[in-house]
Amino acid sequence: MSKAKKVLDEARETQNRELDLVDKGLVSFEELPGLFNMSNITRLTLSHNKISVISPGIANLLNLEILNLSNNQLSELPVSLSSMPKLRILNVSINRLGNLPRGFGAFPVLEVLDLSYNNLNEQLLPGNFFGMETLRALYLGDNDFEYIPKELGQLKNLQILGLRDNDLLELPREVGDLLRLRELHIQNNRLQVLPPEVAQLDLLSNKSVMKMEENPWVNPIAEQYLLGISHVIDYLKTDTYKIIYNRHMQGGRGGPPPPKADKSKKASRVRA
């Protein structure tokens, strides 16, 4: 009997609502017979396996609240995933996702979405992606984004936004609409300026975090950053900076900084 099947059988016998199938050498959901009939399951952890396809039948797990599929070999996700009525946390980081299914933003109660370390960019986001009003944390780090759509501002409940290690050339001014945001991670991109609206956010309290290192900032921002994040935020509020920002946005796109790294050898690009 496989280790995975043993875990399933034990869970059925004990009525365990949490399934831990980490690092079980799984390649396919076919190795988990009867899983989709276990409708009482609330947490399913399948990280560190070699799964390349998620069966649409996963949507039969109507009580599932937490799904962790990080560190697999997924290149796409099923449309049915976003219909899961109780799913609050979805982790599909460290995979090979090169697209997202149509209607992906239809999750009714999703609070945490981790898509970091994949092959996503702004062209690949479905139209309703930013319709997930319940989202509290969105992790898009280690992808290929150069721009984030202005619809980002619709995520009114967002508290954590992770955009580190992309190719971002700018942030939308609508980031200032995320009034509940307490963590902003934008380090290691190609950003030269920040929208002045960032100064509207509460990023200076004890529980707040703003990471912005490893970007080719214009000199005034770079100088303020050496003094600390609070100096950057104060500077963004000045009329002087607003002039610099507007000039940059009107004429600065002609020569964006070059890509920082060759991502062709990134693990998410490797095909088995």
Image (cartoon, rainbow, N blue to C red):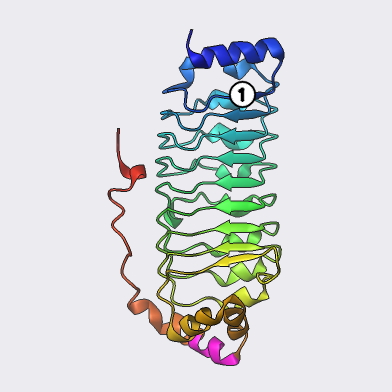
- Residue sitting at x 48%, y 54%: 141
Q: Is residue 90 left or right of residue 190?
A: right
Q: For residue 268, which quarter of the picture?
A: top left
Question: In the rendering, at what x and y percent does residue 171 appear?
Answer: 51, 69
Quadrant housing residue 197: bottom right
Name above or below for residue 72 compared with residue 227.
Answer: above
Would residue 156 appear left or right of 76 to someone viewing this image? right
Q: Is residue 256 magenta?
A: no
Q: Secondary structure at mark 1?
A: strand
Percent position of residue 182, x then y = 66, 63
Residue that extends furthest to the bottom in the rendered view of this protein: 240
- The C terminus sits in image quarter: top left
Q: Is residue 65 visible?
A: yes
Q: Which residue is mark 1?
A: 19
Q: Is residue 240 magenta?
A: yes
> Would residue 197 be visible to someone looking at this image?
no
Up-down relation of residue 234 to residue 48 (above or below):
below
Q: Which residues are magenta?
A: 239-244
Residue at image coords 57%, 78%: 228
Nearer to the camera, 147 or 231:
231
- The spot of residue 32 in percent (x, y) is 52, 16
